[in-house]
Amino acid sequence: MRVSDLKVSVEDDVLVIKGSHKKEEGENESWSARSYSSYNTRLAVPENCEMEKIKAELKNGVLNISIPKGKVESKVMDVNVE
């Protein structure tokens, strides 16, 4: 696969990965071999990640996606006991 064959996006807290690959061989001969493959998946993105810093890298046919975690703020609230 090439980078032009892939599309990675985030839609409403969902990571969308789409890919397609077309291959044609032997167009000048009496017959030609064609193959087509596609891939489409959706993954829920955690709420505590930094959406703007999501990175995708394609290297040697392997897609690596990095989703950095944001700071988790835990809120502690005292409750009055009566």
Image (cartoon, grey):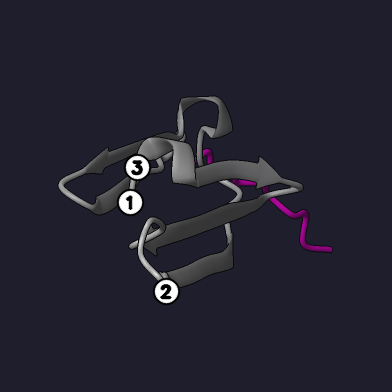
Give the number of the mark in front: 1 or 2. 2
Query: In the rendered structure, are the residues bearing label 3 and label 1 in contact, judged by CB atoms less than 8 Å apart?
Result: yes
Report which residue position mark 1 lands on: 1
> Horizontal and vertical percent for residue 60?
15, 47
Q: Nearer the viewer, residue 76 or 49?
A: 49
Q: Quadrant of residue 32?
A: bottom left
Disc 2 secondary structure class: loop
Question: What is the magenta segment's predominant secondary structure?
Answer: loop
Q: Residue at x 56, y 56 (%)?
A: 18
- Cα distance, mark 1 to mark 2? 24 Å
Give the number of the mark in front: 3 or 2. 2
Q: Is residue 11 left or right of residue 3?
A: right
Mark linked to residue 31: 2
Instruction: Looking at the image, tell me whether mark 1 or mark 2 is earlier in sequence order.
Output: 1
Q: Identify residue type, mark 3.
A: Arg
> Horizontal and vertical percent for residue 82?
84, 63
> Horizontal and vertical percent for residue 59?
19, 42
Q: Nearer the viewer, residue 22 or 14?
A: 22
Q: Is residue 69 left or right of residue 40?
A: left
Is residue 81 positioned above or below 56 on the image? below
- Cα distance, mark 3 to mark 2? 26 Å
Q: Identify residue type, mark 2.
A: Trp
Q: Identify residue type, mark 1.
A: Met
Q: Residue at x 46, y 36 (%)?
A: 4
Q: Residues within 10 Å of mark 2 (few under 14, many from 20)?
A: few
Report which residue position mark 3 lands on: 2
